[in-house]
Structures are given as C-alpha cells and as structure tokens.
Amino acid sequence: MKSTLAPGIRLITSFSRDSWYRGFILLLTFLFYTAYHLSRKPISIVKSELHRNCSTVIRPADLNITNNVTWCDWPPFDQDNYQTLFGVLDNSFLVAYAIGMFFSGIFGERLPLRYYLSFGMLMSGLFTCLFGLGFYWNIHSLGYYAFIQVMNGLMQTTGWPAVVACVGNWFGKGKRGFIMGVWNSHTSVGNILGSLIAGVFVSSAWGMSFIVPGLIIASTGILCFFFLVEKPEDVNCSPPQHHVSHNPNLQLFEIIQCCSWCFCLLQGVVEFSLCLLFAKLVSYTFLYWLPLYISNVAHFDPKQAGDMSTLFDVGGILGGVMAGLVSDYTGGRATTCCVMLVAAAPMLFLYNSIGQRSLGTTIGMLLVCGGLVNGPYALITTAVSADLGTHESLRGNSRALSTVTAIIDGTGSIGAALGPLLAGLISPTGWNNVFYMLITADILACLRLHFGEVKQASGHFLALTSVISVHI
C-alpha cells in the first residue's frame, strides 16, 4: 500500500518557499516593533507611582518624615506642578522622536536595514534600562530622566521606517490593507505587554518596570542581527509586484527622485501626513495619560489603572484590522479613515461623560474608542505609507518607501509630541478640557483628509479636461 504524507507535513509542503519566507519576515518585524512599543509604555504606568495620593498609603512606622502629603512620592515629582514635569518627560522623548524621524528615513535608505534596526533596538534597550536604574541609583534629577528620554526618542526613530520598508519589500499591494492591519497590531500588542510587565513591578520596585522591557528590546535587536532578510532577492525569492501601469508623468517624477524631501510632492503624502499629525495627537495622549486619567477619575491603584488602559489597545487591534479590511474591499483608504474619525469624536465625548459610571461601561467605551482612534492611525502609518512609497512614479525604488514612511510618520510625530504636552498643561484645569482638545484634534484630522480628497478630485477633473481638449 502506498504511504501517504501525514496531515501536518501536507500542510507544511502546501506552502511555497516564498510563502514561508514572507510569513517569517512578517512575524519577525511584528516582534521587532512590538518590542519598540513595549519599551515606550512603562512611563505612562509609572507616573501614578511617582506621584501618589499618600493619604491612602500605609506609612512605615520607622520612617521619619517632614511632609505628610508627599512623603511617598519620588522627588522631583512630589511638587504641585508634577503634571507639568511629566509633560517634560513625555515631550523630551516625543520631540526628539519627531525631529529624528525626518532624518531616520534618509538613513534607512542608505544603510543596511538589518544593521540599522539592530543598532536602534540595542541602544533603545540601553536607555530604557538607564531610566529604570535611576530608581536603584536613587537619582532625583529631572535633567537625568529628561536626557534619557531624549536619547531614547532618537534611538526609537530607527524602528518604523525600517520595518515598513522591509515589509514593503516583501509584500505587494493586493491585500496590503488587511495584511498591514493585522501586522500593525504590534503597536497595541506592545502597549498591552508593556503595561502588564510594568504593572507587575510598579508598586514594589518601579525601576524594573523599565529594565525588563529594556532587556526585551535589546534581545530582539540581537535576533534581528542574526535573522532579518531585507529583500526577497537576498534569498532567491520572487519580489512582489507593486505597480505595472504606465506612468504619464515619468519625467516629472524622475526629477522628484533626485531629492528625498520632494517625495512630499507625491499626491496624498501631504494630506495623509497632516491627518496623521492630528490622529497621533489623540492616540499618544491616550498612550501617555490614560492610566493616570483612570487612576484620578476612577480611583484605581497604579496596577489596576494600567491593566484597565490595555483595553484601549485591544480596541486598537480590532480597529486596525477592520480599517484594513474595509479599505481593501472599498479601495478607499481616505474614506475609511474619515468615517472612523467622524465616529470617534462623539465617542470621546461620551467616554469622558459616562465612561466611568460602571465597570461594564468603562470596558465597552475603552474598546470602542480604541478602535475608532487607532484604526485610522494604523491605516495611515502602514497601508497608506506603503502604497505611496511603492507608487508607480518611483519606478520600483523600494528604498523610497523608507523616506515616504519617515515623512508621514515624522509629521504625525509632531502631533504625538503636542498631545501629551497639551494634556500636561491643560489637565490642571480639569480633564474635561483635555477631552475637548482631543475632540477638536479628531475633527481637524477628518477635515484635513476631506479637503485633501476634494483637492485630489479637482486635480483629476482638470487633468481629464486637459486630455479631452488636446484630443479635440
């Protein structure tokens, strides 16, 4: 009797060598950027431990104190302006990240991605650990922590342009929205894991809330060095088909290719960049301030607030996948983003108004708000960036994807820096005002994208009339 292959072996052999490599690269880059976000999250969890409500904390009997109000706080965050000081830490990271991102894509074009990513993750791990060591070294200098945040922000810019460029090298445009939507869940998965890991140590030794994530991202840097394959051609795999249509404006874009910054002239780059600026303003305000908001409003302890904040990221995973699926089916990336942004504004208002009335309401509102806020953000930073970076006008220049991604995400990172800064300045006047700021930013993101679509439609109309007049 002829032997038959075992079901598991038949499953394995049903996939081609190219498919296995593509799946491997997708998993590897997923792990890399999960580690990047995992190492960013601890600061938002530790904030509520650095400045606490000391009246609810049991004071050790042998502790000699002079201030009953702030005895359990970590100086210099024991002052009345602690929220402003937290804003300084956030913006030390985010401003450095925003500035560095504009240059990161250029470096990503010219350096091997494997070396670039490995270096970035190892250095990010070093500076994340140094922040946590401030606990064990008993450092109370704001300047020390701000400097560490600046350096970490610069090192973290190595991640996004490089991983998007690598995935763009391996995958075509066919189902890019869905693939990128699933893949981009690394952002939320990293936030969730970072929150949970930091929450384990935050109440006992908050330094470990940074050291453990720092060691994790450093480990993924070593993994990257030994296993990342930048392009299919490097392992004799077939490259994906990006665009095959004829480009009537070839000469124009040959000129554009001479200057990296001129990628801004590609249709859609400016519109989506400015939309992402406002979208990331909202998303990163939640990233850095949601645990503290939950702790202050719902009166949860730091660990409970951190765990509850992960629901926003769970919603973000679902929203990113849904946005990718819908945009693939409809073919309208901008329309999908607009619809979700329009729905997000009233949901943010409702969350602030009734979101803390019961546990069930809090869970439901966090999931919905997370999906609507992070869905457009995920779609723009992944599928849209990859679409524009592999535009037919770039004539197969896959390296250009790194620059286009950096321009879009760099512009968005300006909003990411502004959001937490404004939250730190506004929150002393009341959390309601913070949410009004977020709602305004959400509406501006939608309007920017809508006007861009109108402009694009007008351009198509003028191009069509010019062609008709030539033929007549």
Image (cartoon, helix red, strand yellow):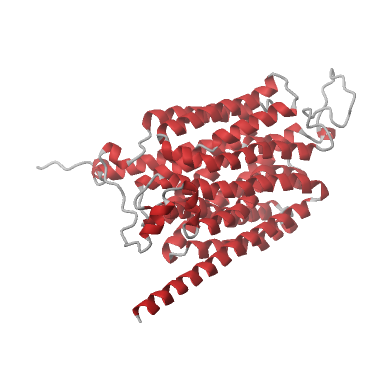
Q: Is residue 16 visible?
A: yes
Q: Residue at x 41, y 53 (%)?
A: 255
Count of marks overlaid on the render: 0
Q: Is residue 162 above or below residue 74?
A: below
Q: Is residue 370 visible?
A: no
Position of residue 369 measured from the top left corner of the image (x, y, whole percent)? 62, 55
158 left or right, relative to 143: left
- The answer to which of 380 and 295 lies nearer the viewer is 380
Where does the image place residue 371, in percent across and percent down from the top left?
57, 55
Residue in front for this viewpoint, 320 or 192: 320
Quadrant in the picture for the C terminus: bottom left
140 over 43 or under it: above or below: above
Q: Position of residue 466 (x, y in %)?
A: 42, 75
Question: What residue is rendered at 82% in x and 22% in y?
Answer: 60
Instruction: Locate the N terminus by quadrant.
Output: top left
For this orientation, the residue located farthest to the left is 1
Q: Position of residue 372 (x, y in %)?
A: 59, 57
Position of 15 compared to 191: left or right?
A: left
